[in-house]
Image (cartoon, grey):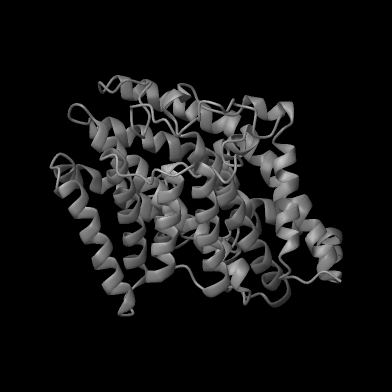
Amino acid sequence: MIGLYDLWPAFVVVALVWSLAGMPLFQRVGFESNSARIRTIDGMRGYLALAVALHHSVIYHEFLTTGVWEYPPSAFYGLLGQLGVSFFFVISAYLFWGKLLSAKSSVNFPALLLKRAFRIGPLYIAAIGAVMVLEVINGPIDYSAFATYERAFFNLLFGVFGYAPLSSFGVYTLAGVTWTLPYEWLFYFSLPIVAIFSRHPVARLGMPVALLGFSILMSAGGGSLAYCYLGLFAGGMMCATLEANALLAKVHRHALSAIALALLAYIFATYEIAYAPVPMLLCIGSFFLIVSGADFFGLLTASRSVRLGEISYGIYLLQGLAFVAVFSISPVRDFALANTGQYWLVILMTMVLLVFMALVAHVVVEKPGVSLGNSLAAGLLLPTGETIGTSEARPWRMPRNLTIQSADRS
């Protein structure tokens, strides 16, 4: 009998999704001008998004049976979601701070933010629009209240304010994933201010270290979780600075991979939550090893992993809609809730649906949105080929002896 919180079903789901990414359909994913993109981190994103989806999969079971949406009692599945988000915060800070560090002239922040808006906004609006349509259909909505229209308006502002449901039906339709976007936007809006510190050789490292130290002190003192999120952003900035100063770990990538995996295993074996000082530092430490060259023995640079990374935003954002699409079918829901083995079988099918939804969204919504954002940014004097990351090639992005398809031999 399969238990709801057994570990192995999660690995089966990931293995199946990884296999699907080898299909010819997935050759259409990817954005233009990928030469400056960081392949290892691109390959990492897909697994992070899947981790969050698996985290919500076990939560969704309890929601269907009890009507309560709460953190799972399983440390493994709880940490999957929190570590996934933690790494996303670290990655965002690493890429954008790295952009500031590598800029050879002043950065055009209006154009940069415009491009980011068209990277995040189109798919976000499509997802939010679908959710609000479902809310209208299922209701009830108080159309006489001004607050209803106010929430609808702010819901469509590219995730800057997150998502406020119009009715109780919409509370979990997005699986609660949009809460991270306001924090991302806060970081983006802070870039013109923190850029002041990026030019000074001491401040460029001192400022992230100070922020990380402040985050640890406040988190250890029982402060808001926002302090931990601040520490994750600071950790990503610190990794970018260490790389810019050529202070990476100069060890073979296989050794780095073993150490990074050991750090992650230690987190899962020791802690129940990731939003705490020590797990946060271990997360940042493992990411530093990835920046230094750890590719998890070729997994993160495999073409299938990179393809999943390219559609990771859709996997992350559309998971709630995939759950609703599957479990709104009464026979399927009854079958899934009959026992946990059948539930995992339905979750397996849901993850397949989610990946194909993300693929379609990537081709139909994301890529055109990015292209439009590049065109508009060009009018603000930002070259459309410029990527949010560092502009210089880094030797660890693609080892000399590794071809694009060697890791998975597809």
| Identity of the residue furthest to the bottom in this view | 221
Residue located at (28% from left, 61% from top):
212
Q: Is residue 141 visible?
A: no
Q: Compared to 403, does 248 lie above or below?
A: below
Q: Quadrant of residue 245?
A: top left
Q: Is residue 106 visible?
A: yes
For the N terminus, the quadrant is bottom right
Q: Nearer the viewer, residue 152 or 144?
A: 152
Q: Nearer the viewer, residue 393 or 376?
A: 393
Percent coordinates x, y for residue 361 in the rendering: 60, 36
For the C terminus, the quadrant is top right
Is 225 positioned to the left or the right of 27 in the image?
Answer: left
Q: Compared to 333, does 37 lie above or below?
A: above
Percent coordinates x, y for residue 290 in the rendering: 46, 46
Q: Nearer the viewer, residue 276 or 189?
A: 276
Is 329 positioned to the left or the right of 76 in the image?
Answer: right
Is 67 positioned to the left or the right of 44 in the image?
Answer: right
Q: Quadrant of residue 395?
A: top left
Q: Compared to 112, does 257 lie above or below?
A: below
Residue located at (40% from left, 50% from top):
288
Residue located at (68% from left, 51% from top):
322
Percent coordinates x, y for residue 167 in the rendering: 55, 63
